[in-house]
């Protein structure tokens, strides 16, 4: 399962990922990271059966944790099946079907939000919007 981690500035210099891996023994895959002097947001992939353990370890270290069951939402009424999302998604979340409809594989999403920016009809939003 994918988890979004938001780090407050006060813990930006701490080796949080390394500490959690060492504490839990869980292998964590980083799918996307945006970290600079003011913000830290990382999307990680964690084995489903260990999500709660890893999430709690990050929370104890002052990190905001959100599970990504459905990172983006497609408004079927607004979508015109133009394929803009299909062509720009770097991890192939969106695919065209033979009937020209679009399928979404949420498990691949890294919340880069490129599809949201590129959708000419505003049919894609983050699940938290």
Image (tube, rainbow, N blue to C red):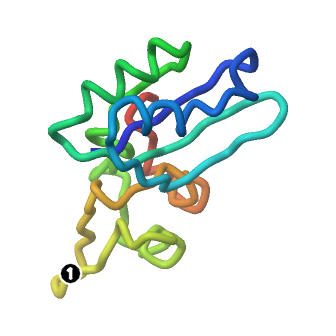
Decide if residue 76 is on the left or right side of residue 45.
left
Residue that protrudes farthest toward the bottom in the picture: 98
Residue 34 in the image: state x and y as whole percent: 67, 45
Residue 7 in the image: state x and y as whole percent: 62, 25
Looking at the picture, tell me which residue is in the foreground, 49 or 112: 49
Label 1 neighbourhood size at 10 Å, few (<14), some (14-19), many (20+)?
A: few
| Number of numbered discs | 1
Q: Residue 96, located in which quarter of the rendered image?
A: bottom left
Looking at the picture, tell me which residue is in the foreground, 50 or 73: 50
Q: Residue at x 45, y 16 (%)?
A: 59
Looking at the picture, tell me which residue is in the foreground, 99 or 57: 57
Above or below, 87 relative to 51: below
Decide if residue 95 is on the left or right side of residue 42.
left
Residue hosting label 1 = 97
Residue that protrudes farthest toward the right in the picture: 37
Above or below, 122 relative to 127: below
Residue 99 in the image: state x and y as whole percent: 16, 83
Above or below, 27 relative to 88: above
Element type at mark 1:
loop
Q: Residue at x 51, y 59 (%)?
A: 115
Residue 45 in the image: state x and y as whole percent: 36, 49
Q: Residue at x 36, y 66 (%)?
A: 93
Image quadrant in which the N terminus is located: top left
């Amino acid at each position: 399962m994918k988890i979004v981690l938001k780090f407050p500035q006060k813990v930006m210099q701490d080796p949080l990922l390394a500490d959690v891996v060492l504490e839990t023994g869980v292998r964590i895959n980083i799918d996307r990271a945006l970290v600079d002097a003011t913000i830290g947001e990382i999307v990680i992939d964690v084995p489903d059966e260990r999500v709660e353990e890893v999430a709690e370890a990050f929370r104890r270290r002052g990190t905001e944790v959100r599970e990504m069951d459905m990172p983006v939402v497609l408004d079927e009424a607004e979508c015109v099946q133009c394929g803009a999302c299909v062509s720009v998604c770097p991890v192939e979340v969106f695919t065209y079907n033979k009937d020209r409809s679009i399928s979404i594989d949420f498990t691949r999403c890294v919340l880069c939000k490129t599809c949201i920016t590129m959708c000419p009809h505003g049919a894609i939003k983050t699940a938290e919007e």
